[in-house]
Amino acid sequence: MTKNLYVDINVLQTVPSSNINRDDTGAPKTAFYGGVTRARVSSQSWKRAVRKAFAEDGANIGTRTKRVPQMLAAKLQDLDSSLDEDAAMSKAIDALKEGGIKVNKDNETGALLMVSPGQISKLADYVWENEKLDKKEVKKILLEGNSLDLALFGRMVADNPELNVDASAQVAHAISTHEIIPEYDYFTALDDLQEKEKSGAALIQTTQYDSATLYRYANINMAELGYNLGGEDAVAGALTFIKDFALSMPTGKQNSFANKTLPNYVMVTVRDDTPVNLVSAFEEPVVAKAGEGYMKGSVKKLEKEFSDSLQFVDQPLATVAVGKYATTVGEQAGNLQDLLNKLQDVLEKAVENEDLND
């Protein structure tokens, strides 16, 4: 593309008593913002949830692992049944080293490495067909055929920065729109076979939790996504990300709290100047009014911040919202699928004369 094109995704979602993303002490993560403590869910946690949603949708996803040599060796054995395990592993290690990826004595990469199925398959084909490997060709293969999650979230290879893939999506840490007070659940467990004359619990513990109305934000650089996908449909990839970002949720302690909720409000903006995170709407925390809770006030503050932001940035190409409250900005969608359909029309028109998919 010769022009900028960005997609901002803003989500408001209530989450009841839960602990979906823990810190090193087992407590729900928090942030201090606007002078008060907020609930927080890390971007890494939500990106993993999105990747799992991609898999459930049947999208092409990559594998993040240290066992790339084993993946490549297995593919080589599929191509040549005469190769034993040791010979296949030797060829796999040689190919990865040729690409600048270090492999340790346990036949693993030194750090987690994200690879797509297409990259492994194509590299195996190249190794099988060529006795002598070309370093440039190996690196080229490892930079082509990116899966959707690899194209969106990128890849860092410390051993060889030439194999890095710049992320086309940015995901913010979700925070509550209001102050939260951490709470504790005291619970016990009884031994089913304990003798009747004995009393007391076999286990006594506490677990920490909170409840919150979360503001979640992510953006997509459509030009970068098109480049990373290398000819695949960037618009379709963006729409899949929007849907799965909106509907996914990290699964921490989900069996204990059954906190799987849906978004209450989603606003997506298409811009040609710069992405805009509207979290500053909640720098002054929302205060719940009697009988209203936090959601109504959060929607109102978010839409006001959107309008106020136009003092500094251009009018977006399009803004589409869906939720339980009628939007005062942009276009109202009837449901999430309607929102995606409207965005598809906007994005396809925006890239119609641009070389986004090449």
Image (cartoon, helix red, strand yellow):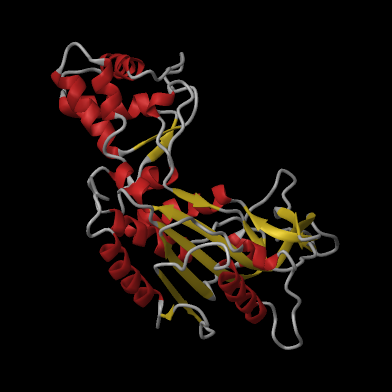
- Does residue 324 show up? yes
Residue 190 visible from this viewpoint: no
Q: Nearer the viewer, residue 308 or 183?
A: 308
Question: What's the residue at 67%, 79% (across, down)?
Answer: 297
Query: Relative to residue 96, is residue 190 depicted above or below?
Result: below
**x and y, in percent, of residue 79 in the image:** 16, 27
Q: Quadrant of the C terminus?
A: top left
Closer-to-camera residue (54/194): 54
Give x and y (percent) for residue 266: 49, 72
Q: Residue at x 47, y 31 (%)?
A: 112
Q: Residue at x 73, y 58 (%)?
A: 191
Residue 180, position as x, y percentages in the image: 76, 65
Quarter assignment of residue 319: bottom left
Q: Nearer the viewer, residue 84 or 196?
A: 84
Q: How many marks?
A: 0
Rendered location of residue 343, percent (x, y) = 35, 69
Q: Give the left or right position of residue 114, taking residue 130 as reference.
A: right
> Which residue is most to the bottom?
291
In the picture shown, does residue 167 fall above or below 220? above
Tell me if residue 346 comes above or below residue 109 in the rendering.
Answer: below
Viewer-proximal residue among 23 and 324: 324
In this rendering, position of residue 278 left or right of residue 152: right
Outermost residue, left direction? 129
